[in-house]
Image (cartoon, rainbow, N blue to C red):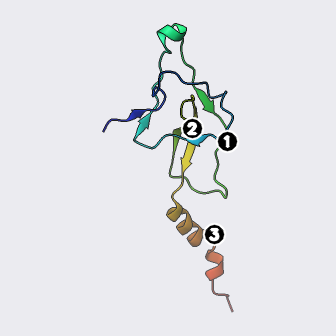
Amino acid sequence: MKTIDLVHVGPKLMPPTVFNGTITELSESCKHHVLFGDASWTEDYMTQIVPFVDLQEVVTNPPRPINGIGWFYQGQPEYGGYLASKIFVKKKIHDEYMEKNLFAHERLVPYL
């Protein structure tokens, strides 16, 4: 299955710093990719593109065991975007862990 390049979808994108609105996730796992390369020869003589990366801390609250980490692309259509990190948590595993370990003291029979 071929993936779709999210960045090079139109003739020219506005910089993401110009957009003054809500940023949304534009990528889907295994459906999209981001291609890094040169800019247009006719527009800016093939200068190198440096991607914007969102370096905000990503945590689970409350703390949970994680299932994986990855990157996603966020922005708005017709504007450049940002790469940001993402963590994946399996809710079922978290709930089973909490039930077995953290709440085990509630099931103890008192010693007489």
Q: In this figure, which residue is indicated by the disc labeled 3?
A: 102
**Which amino acid type is shown beneath numbered disc 3?**
Leu
Secondary structure under the numbered disc 2 in the rendered image = strand
Residue 51 to residue 55: above or below: above
Residue 63, above or below 6: below
What residue do we see at 69% from left, 92% from top?
A: 112
Q: Which residue is mark 2?
A: 74
Camera sees residue 72: yes
Q: Position of residue 81 (x, y in %)?
A: 57, 31
- Nearer-N-terminus badge (3/2): 2
- Secondary structure state at the residue bearing disc 1: loop
Mark 1 lies on residue: 57
- Judged left or right of residue 111, residue 42 is left
Quick one: label 1, few (<14), some, or many (20+) residues within 10 Å? few
Give how far apart the Cα atoms at labels 1 and 2 are.
16 Å
Tag in front: 1 or 2:
2
